[in-house]
Image (tube, grey):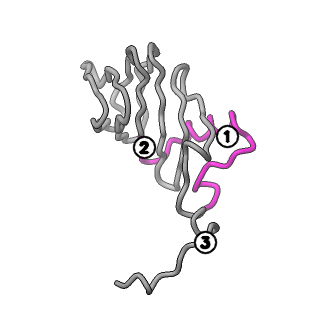
Amino acid sequence: MKESDFKKATAEDRAKHIIRPYEQVPMTELVPGSDSHLVATEKLTVSFLTMRAGSVFELHTHSNEQCMIVIEGYCDELIGDKMYRVEKGDVIFLPANIPHGAFIRDVDCKAIDIFAPRREDYLEKQREQHPDSTVQFVDKL
């Protein structure tokens, strides 16, 4: 492989494959106290999540597998009937249909959640809250 074998991508090429979610995707309220920049493809959803200090992400289930990467702060994650302190750098795996939620303590907790298959309910919330916005990568398929 040689660098000279490749052309420099145009802005149009870039838009097909690359996005800056914090700048280009509006925040969508998922539940009170938790907002996200949502990016989706045909098969997965990526949620750039901010859970505000003092809030609670109620216990819930969904049919999607989920990996959560804590990138700032911490929270007490509920998985099944156990509580785990998770903090920056931790990766949490949540199998489909397992009850989970979180208590967000004295600082915001920021995380990147990856769901497969994609979270249609989250994308519907994004479309409802931002009707003039596109769902990145999904609406380009």
Question: Of circles 2 and 3, which is in front?
Answer: 3
Q: Secondary structure at mark 1?
A: helix
Q: Depth check: 33 or 74 in front?
A: 74
**Residue carrying label 3:** 10
Marks 2 and 3, how far apart in space? 30 Å
* Amino acid found under the numbered disc labelled 2: Phe
What percent of the width, then of the height, locates residue 52?
Answer: 48, 21
The residue under the point 55% across, 20% down is: 32
Q: Which residues are magenta?
A: 113-140
The residue under the point 28% across, 27% down is: 86
Direction from residue 110 to residue 77 in the image, left or right? left
Q: Depth check: 51 or 42 in front?
A: 51
- Dot 2: within a 10 Å radius of its alpha carbon, few (fewer than 14), some, or many (20 or more) residues? many
Marks 2 and 1, how far apart in space? 18 Å
Quadrant of the drawing holding the C terminus: bottom right
Marks 3 and 1, how far apart in space? 28 Å
What percent of the width, then of the height, locates residue 118?
Answer: 49, 46
First along the sequence among labels 3 and 1 = 3
**Residue carrying label 1:** 127
First along the sequence among labels 2 and 3 = 3
Quadrant of the drawing holding the N terminus: bottom left
Q: In the rendered view, would you say 6 is above or below 126?
A: below
What percent of the width, then of the height, locates residue 127?
Answer: 67, 40
Q: In the rendered view, would you say 8 is above or below 72?
A: below
Question: Which corner quadrant of the image does residue 60 belong to?
Answer: top left
* Amino acid found under the numbered disc labelled 1: Arg
**Residue carrying label 2:** 115
Question: Which corner quadrant of the image does residue 16 belong to?
Answer: bottom right
Q: In the rendered view, would you say 11 is above or below 70?
A: below
The residue under the point 47% across, 54% down is: 43
Q: Secondary structure at mark 3?
A: loop
